[in-house]
Amino acid sequence: MKKATTKQKPSNRIGSLATAFVALFLLGCFLVFLLPAVVESVFQGQLSKATGLPVELGRVHFSLSQPQFSIQDVQVLNPVGFPAGPLAEVSEARVRYAPSAKFVGGFELKRLEIDFKDFRVLRNEKGVLNLPIGVLTGRGSVIEEVKLNLASVTYTDLSGRQPAQQTFELGLTNAIYRNVKGIPGILEILNWEILKRTGLEEKKAPALSEIKPIAGLPAANQTAPGAVPTPPSQANSTASEPSPAPSAQAAG
């Protein structure tokens, strides 16, 4: 005796489709509205803790089709003892992530690409630089790849009788670093690159650990107006400088 085949009622199919539609709608609302706010709060706290400085973030955009998002208009403000204003401005940071319980909010950073809009190195009236940035914090989770775009930095010296300003061309275009130890590792790379390529005197503490090179990039070329005093001897070097690797061992 053949078994009677049961057909799903049209009303049941419509109910299933409606449930799926509602679930997708709620997921879309979460990705568009709630998740960006959560990520903005988390990143702002992480950056402020790592730099020890006030940080302001712009909009966060999540991709609905790929595990990635972008953060626009990031500003890191100057420390106490320096003129009010941004130390660094990032036009956009693009992040690729993977689901993980290790990262607050359920994400682990896999790849980070940072496009700097401006970076302003200052020497105050006491002769102290606003570099290096960052505080001694625990290392974050390893980021597999970091790409930096930082073409130049503006240096302003307020320690003389009159303020003087000059620009250093760094040539950091699509500079790639692998196995970077979280946000503190990125700050370590930035400090080391800028101080090395400009020849500017760094503060005595904290000492920066050496970052070994993995690929070739030209050294900083300096352009200074006539009223600017002669730059430090290191900045006059014309030798080609390699692009360094992160503080962690490079990927195979």
Image: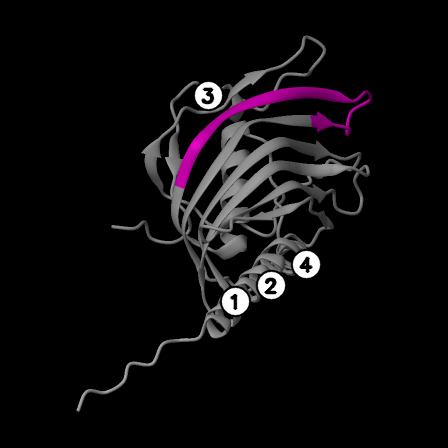
- For the residue labelled by badge 3, is the local secondary structure a helix, a strand or a loop? loop
Q: Quadrant of the N terminus?
A: bottom left
Q: CA distance from mark 2 to mark 3?
A: 58 Å
Sooner in the amino-acid sequence: mark 2 or mark 4: 2
Tell me the amino acid under the disc marked 4.
Ser
Q: Identify the main secondary structure in magenta.
A: strand
- For the residue labelled by badge 4, is the local secondary structure a helix, a strand or a loop? helix
* Above or below: residue 123 compared with residue 67: above
Across and down, in percent, residue 141 comes to 46, 62
Q: CA distance from mark 4 to mark 3?
A: 43 Å
Q: Which residue is label 3 attached to?
A: 237
Q: Which residue is label 4 attached to?
A: 41
Q: CA distance from mark 1 to mark 2?
A: 18 Å
Across and down, in percent, residue 5 comes to 29, 81
Tell me the amino acid under the disc marked 1.
Gly
Q: Nearer the viewer, residue 145 or 204?
A: 145
Q: Which residue is label 2 attached to?
A: 26
Q: CA distance from mark 4 to mark 1?
A: 14 Å
Across and down, in percent, residue 43 comes to 62, 56
